[in-house]
């Protein structure tokens, strides 16, 4: 009896936690989370079973589930990298883990476009069906005592309501959709795919893909960024940034023809903007079409707007260049 | 004889340096001529974004980066890696990380470790009589 009193005294400060835990346990045993129910009631029209068995597996070492999960997902995009190489790029020693935004940054540094998918199981399944393993952040314990963990969804079995994961030390972890949703929900349903340049994730939307491409452009090689934007221009031909991104990266690679084509398309889409004409003028000059270049730069200056001073600088440079060339 | 060879060599080296310098200067000139006024994709995106004060946000992001780099160093990241890690983030990501580096979820748990925690918690709740998961526990009276 005295022992019981002792235990109660110890527990009193966190008795509310025990209550919540009790509720959580009841829920874990009985409640089925909403997305799993919706999925059971109206199954999506996708393949019943998928397993991306070729996805590489790296058993997690110490706290390195971030590097292991990323290396595993990158393998499907044809990028061969070992978790040991990734660890210095994203592991944060003092936090004993890896942060979500650094997962994105490390994917970029290794030549893949990270894309955060919509927070739904249907999007997750659609990506897996389309051949893209999905990196997810789970909280395996409780919201008040989190145990954050990255794993990779590589397959599913709809009739059995199961997912197949590369997780920690387990090559092929089978988890019920219900349990998975509980653990995934606590991370706010965070999930990413890491696409090879030129591949658009199955569930990608225009706005988010372009935003991902802009962040990628700052880190990637120009040829990679060009492929990312060119794929966008192909899918969403009315998107100005897709064409400008294609043109700019083609320009940086001295691929003048591709750059000229892209800037001309952009100029048609945004007739009021000086940017496509300014960059087109520079591209023409690079091809020794200096008169055309000067004429185009003049049009850019006439449009003024946001890029007035930069367009004027371009025009001045081109006029100087023409004078120099005339003298030679 | 020897000094003559030396002077030939020296002359050759001087010429080589002159040629290389001239070539690299020509290259630099051609790069600066075109690229300095190329309007970047990011600049166009900034004019499209509807968010007011995105210009201020960009300036703030410039200040966030050195701060974030210092924070990564403090938390055990190598100095060269810290610089490259910061460079690979977008402005928004760098800002969020600089503000919340100690509170954002850090995925690192080993699954077995997590299961152990659940096991211990269940064991305690079993003993307290809230649950009955294990056959070997007897709730306290």
Image (cartoon, grey):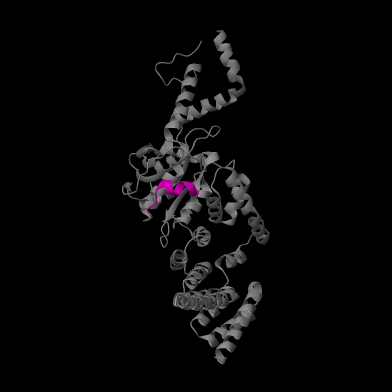
The location of residue B97, given as percent across then percent down, is 59, 48
Overall secondary structure of the magenta section: helix
The location of residue B112, given as percent across then percent down, is 42, 32
**Quarter of the rendering containing residue A65:** top left
Query: Is residue A50 inside the magenta stretch?
Result: no
Rendered view: A39 above or below A268: above
Rendered view: B74 above or below A25: below
Using residue A3 as the reference point, say whether residue B99 is left or right of it.
right
What residue is rendered at 48% in x and 30% in y? A27
In the foreground, A285 or A9: A285
The location of residue A169, given as percent across then percent down, is 38, 37
Rendered view: B21 above or below A215: below
Query: Is residue A82 inside the magenta stretch?
Result: yes
Residue range of the region highlighted in magenta in the rendering: A80-89
The location of residue B10, given as percent across then percent down, is 50, 75
Rendered view: B49 above or below A29: below
Question: Which residue is farthest front?
Answer: B1
């Amino acid at each position: 009896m005295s022992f019981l009193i002792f235990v109660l005294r110890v527990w009193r400060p966190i008795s509310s936690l025990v209550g919540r835990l009790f509720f959580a346990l009841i829920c874990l045993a009985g409640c089925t989370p909403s997305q799993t129910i919706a999925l059971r009631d109206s199954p999506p029209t996708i393949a019943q079973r998928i397993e991306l068995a070729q996805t590489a597996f790296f058993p997690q070492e110490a706290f390195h589930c971030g590097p292991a999960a990323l290396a595993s997902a990158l393998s499907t995009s044809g990028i061969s990298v070992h978790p040991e190489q990734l660890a210095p790029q994203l592991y944060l020693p003092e936090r004993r883990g890896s942060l979500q935004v650094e997962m994105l940054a490390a994917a970029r540094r290794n030549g893949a476009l990270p894309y955060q998918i919509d927070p739904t199981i249907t999007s997750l399944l659609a990506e897996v069906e389309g051949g893209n393993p999905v990196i997810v952040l789970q909280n395996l314990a409780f919201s008040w005592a989190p145990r954050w963990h990255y794993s990779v969804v590589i397959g599913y079995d709809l009739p059995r309501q199961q997912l197949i994961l590369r997780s920690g030390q387990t090559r092929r972890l089978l988890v019920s959709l219900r349990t998975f949703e509980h653990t995934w929900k606590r991370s706010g349903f965070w999930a990413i795919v890491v696409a090879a340049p030129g591949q658009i994730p199955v569930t990608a939307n225009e706005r988010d893909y372009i935003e991902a491409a802009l962040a990628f452009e700052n880190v990637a090689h120009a040829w990679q960024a060009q492929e990312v934007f060119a794929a966008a221009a192909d899918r969403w031909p009315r998107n100005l940034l897709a064409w400008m991104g294609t043109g700019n990266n083609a320009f940086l690679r001295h691929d003048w023809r591709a750059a000229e084509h892209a800037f001309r398309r952009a100029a048609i889409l945004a007739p009021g903007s000086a940017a496509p004409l300014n960059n087109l003028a520079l591209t023409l000059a690079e091809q020794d079409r200096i008169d055309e270049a000067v004429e185009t730069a003049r049009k850019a200056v006439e449009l003024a707007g946001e890029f007035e001073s930069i367009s004027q600088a371009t025009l001045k440079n081109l006029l100087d260049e023409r004078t120099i060339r005339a003298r030679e | 004889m020897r000094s003559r060879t030396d002077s030939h060599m020296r002359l050759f080296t001087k010429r080589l340096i002159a040629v290389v310098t001239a070539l690299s200067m020509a290259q630099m000139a051609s790069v600066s001529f075109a690229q300095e006024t190329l309007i970047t994709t990011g600049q166009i995106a900034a004019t499209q974004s509807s968010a007011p004060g995105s210009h201020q946000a960009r300036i703030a992001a410039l200040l966030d980066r050195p701060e974030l780099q210092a924070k990564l160093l403090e938390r055990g990241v190598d100095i060269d890696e810290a610089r490259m890690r910061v460079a690979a983030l977008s402005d928004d990501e760098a800002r969020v990380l600089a503000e919340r580096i100690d509170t954002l979820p850090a995925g690192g748990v080993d699954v077995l470790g997590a299961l152990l925690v659940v096991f211990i918690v269940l064991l305690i709740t079993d003993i307290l009589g809230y649950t009955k998961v294990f056959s070997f526990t007897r709730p306290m009276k």
